[in-house]
Amino acid sequence: MQFNRRGLLVGATALVLASQMRLARAAGSINYWHHFASQSEMHGLLKIIELYQAKYPGSNVTQESIPNSDYMAKISSAVLAGGRPDTAMVIAERFADLRAMDALVDISGRINGWAGKANFPENRWEGLSQDSAIYAVPAFAFVDWMYYRTDYFDRAGLSGPPKNFDEFLQAARKLTDPFKGRYAFGMRAGAGGFKYVIDVMEAFGSPIVKDGQPAIDRAAAIEAITFYSDLFVKEKVVPPSAPNDSYRQIMEAFRTGQTAMLWHHTGSLSEISGALKQGEQFWTAPMPSGPKARIARVAYCGNSVLKEDNIEAAWQWISFWSEPEASVAFLEATGYFPASTAALQDPRITTNKIYDAAVKTLDFGRLPNNFVGAPGWSESVVNPAFQAVLTGQTTPADAVNRMIRGLESALR
């Protein structure tokens, strides 16, 4: 009997030690690559790391911020040279290219056996999955919406934000006063402006890709490019600097009162709220509807595992982002919306009316276009083609022709 007790004791001790070793491995050091850059993004990331390390004592996360423009090149180099990080951030627009270079680990087995999966509707996985295999845990979403200056709208006798493109144009005319240096709309036609060009094309009824093949409707696309470029060329309701304006310029123009309407996403709420008073000076609204569709992107960003070596700690880190406390903490720091429905039930979201437009957008928002070559086509073809229209170097029809040719080349 004594021998049996000793054996049980030894066995129990072994189990405890094994359990402790598993916890130690799971709570071990990992590295995380991302392209967060702003002060609010870094504050949010450091808050998540703080919460993570409080929950898993002994854990260590080494984060590395990579400039957005260099991100894909660095991942590609790491894949080729064998220097992959444990985990990395993946946005939907880049998922196809990352899968094509075999950068991501299939984590379907862990996802399907994970209780947290119930908090993610099927559409959360669409931009992070391929052929029934899942490669990332959704962490947060960039939800498109519109900012508008409530004080300017009141002075112009406008009762509320525009619900469609016709109302948008009518409001833009009333809000523009070039003699005061005030324009209605902060058009982003510099770096990153391709996003809104593509959105307007779809709002006018032109798809981009269908079943992996080019699908631009030339007539609808020309109509869209004409409408959008006319805001600058003909209507003159956007600042003269629009052809070169990127994120920083459109944000500064709205914050300083040069513009009265701005298209962006929830990620800029923190910055704008730091300069203007919610309700008194600005508010949020869903994106206006085009003639054929209401286009607003809900771009889910996920965290992926890039190598198997440290899989327990890597999984622990990427799944932690889905927990409500982490998701809401990141929202409060950045404005980036939680992907988890459990987090969306938090009273810090449900009782704050500034988020209503984003919640409504979740019902009709679309994923960004996600096909191999999409980033390159968007940046090197769509952006310069539209800029050329604004500067009078080409026509909307020629710009669309250039986009179609570029898309066909990208999809070969």
Image (cartoon, rainbow, N blue to C red):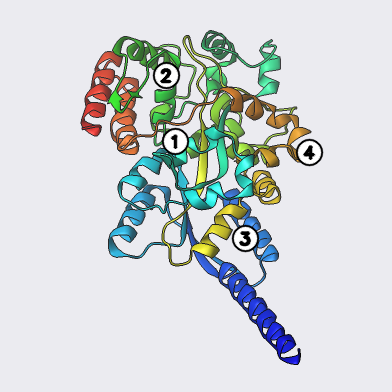
What residue lies at 24% left-to-right and 28% top-to-bottom?
406
Q: Which residue is mark 2?
A: 202
3D distance between C-alphas at marks 2 and 3? 39 Å
Instruction: Say whether residue 32 is left or right of residue 323.
Output: left
Q: Which residue is mark 4?
A: 347
Q: Which sits in the foreground, 387 or 411?
A: 411
Q: Where residue 263 appears, x then y in whole percent?
A: 53, 27
Label 4 close to label 2 by CB (< 8 Å): no
- Label whose residue precedes the other's in the sequence (3 or 4): 3
SS assignment at label 3: helix
Residues packed near mark 1 inside 10 Å, few (<14), some (14 to 19) or many (20 plus): some
- Amino acid type at circle 1 is Ser
Vertical order, 371 against 365 (above or below): below
- Amino acid type at circle 2 is Glu
Q: Residue furthest front?
A: 1
Q: Quadrant of residue 389?
A: top left
Q: Which sits in the foreground, 200 or 233?
A: 200
- Label whose residue precedes the other's in the sequence (1 or 2): 2
- Label whose residue precedes the other's in the sequence (1 or 4): 1
- Amino acid type at circle 3 is Ile
